[in-house]
Image: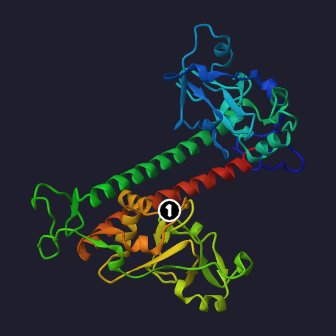
Amino acid sequence: MTRKMGKMVPELRFPEFEGEWEATQLSKLSSQVTSGSRDWAQFYTPKGDKFIRMTNLPRDGNIRLILDDMKYVTLPLNSSDGLRTSLKTGDILISITAELGKIGLIPENFGKAYINQHIALVKPRIDLTAPTFVAYFLALTSSNNRFNRLNDSGAKAGLNLKTIRAFEVNTPPLPEQQKIAAFLSAVDGKIQQLSRQKELLEQYKKGVMQKIFSQQIRFAAQGRANVAGAGRAGATKDDNGQDYPDWREKRLGDLVTKIGSGVTPKGGAKVYQDEGVIFIRSQNVNSNRLLLDDITYISSEMHNSMKSSEVYASDILLNITGASIGRSCVVPANFTTGNVNQHVCIIRMAEEASEYFYQIFLSSYYGQKLIFQSQAGGGREGLNFQNIRTFKVPYPSYEEQQKIALFLTGIDQKIEAVQNQLTQSQTFKKGLLQKMFV
């Protein structure tokens, strides 16, 4: 957002529009500003009308309601609270307690819905303003900052309706509002489409992994997945046209050359540097990848004193303590050198075992079940090296391991490509929100 030469004019604007924007109180753009009431739990039912709570309001410039965790209510006939807080298309919701300033917009064909006392309800006048435009304006970071500065820090912290009504919205004429709203809605539609595409790919991968490790499907020489039938009828072939051998079960410790972890250097975080040798912590092992955007470093001298925790390309890294226990990744081929701390275990596979296959197994339902069942006792989440060595893991032929790994990493690459598009679209939208409003 910007003001050009002291004027209320956005930095980025459709060419057919000109003139300054105006600051108008929300009450003057609305036919009603109210909030919900208390004691809705008595009306909860397994099915019924939607009941919107603060958890259903999005963050970070989004206005699309989150409907994953819905509650439903059935009201008595002619309920006064129901009549006052009934939601309609284009209504704007604002969180007014706890996490202030989260915004939601009621979409078309939403059906009957209500709110509780933690949410303010704004009913925009469509003859004066475009509800979607106002919702995007209220969801801006600058607007959220204003909401939080207006917080009533008294006995009952939050935003009162008087404050909401007096909140100023910077608006252009209605046609420009409508065009901005339509453009941003299209961008959000693209983001939603990419999010759904990623979700479907992740669900597909999860389902395929379960079928692979239960051997409901096996892999052919060309990489095709075949459904396994009775006996050997569905078994697949190797590159010489022979059946792949039946899977065996082995201890993970029999398939590795190293299982071990590092230590936190003496002095802890005080010895971390802005450059030097990479030092990997549990937060760097996430989403089946080694994330280096929040990496820290240690000196070469410290690295040389910690040779037992040195990490090489193709190592599997497994988080073994804390809330992130069970997350894993394969160290990529272009990795140079580094160390891990005591919360990350290095698993170095022997030649007859594919690191990608076994990392995928560890991240699967079956691998996560092993990890959960093997945690050390004493009320503390954690795995020790003996636990990990005794993991009973599937052992297909090395060729079949490679085919499975290649297939599943191919899905990962598709997921990553969609994620990159999603990130680019979200960054594009963020830039628009900064430049299209005053």
Neighbor class of circle 1 (other Cα within 10 Å; few <14, some 14-19, many 20+) is few
- Closer to us: 33 or 337: 337
- Closer to us: 205 or 250: 250
**Left or right: 154, with 381 as reference point:** right
**Which type of secondary structure does the marked residue at label 1 adopt?**
loop
Find residue 76 and report its horizontal and vertical position in percent: 58, 10
**Left or right: 48, with 92 as reference point:** left
Q: Name above or below for residue 363 compared with residue 176.
A: below
**Left or right: 421, with 253 as reference point:** right
Residue at the farthest right position:
6
- The residue at 59%/38% (across/down) is 64
Find residue 229 and report its horizontal and vertical position in percent: 13, 55
Residue 438 visible in image: no
What's the amino acid at mark 1?
A: Gly
**Left or right: 222, with 119 as reference point:** left
What is the quadrant of residue 392 in the picture? Answer: bottom left
- The residue at 19%/66% (across/down) is 220
Residue 267 visible in image: yes
What is the quadrant of residue 233 in the picture? Answer: bottom left
Residue to which mark 1 is pinned: 377
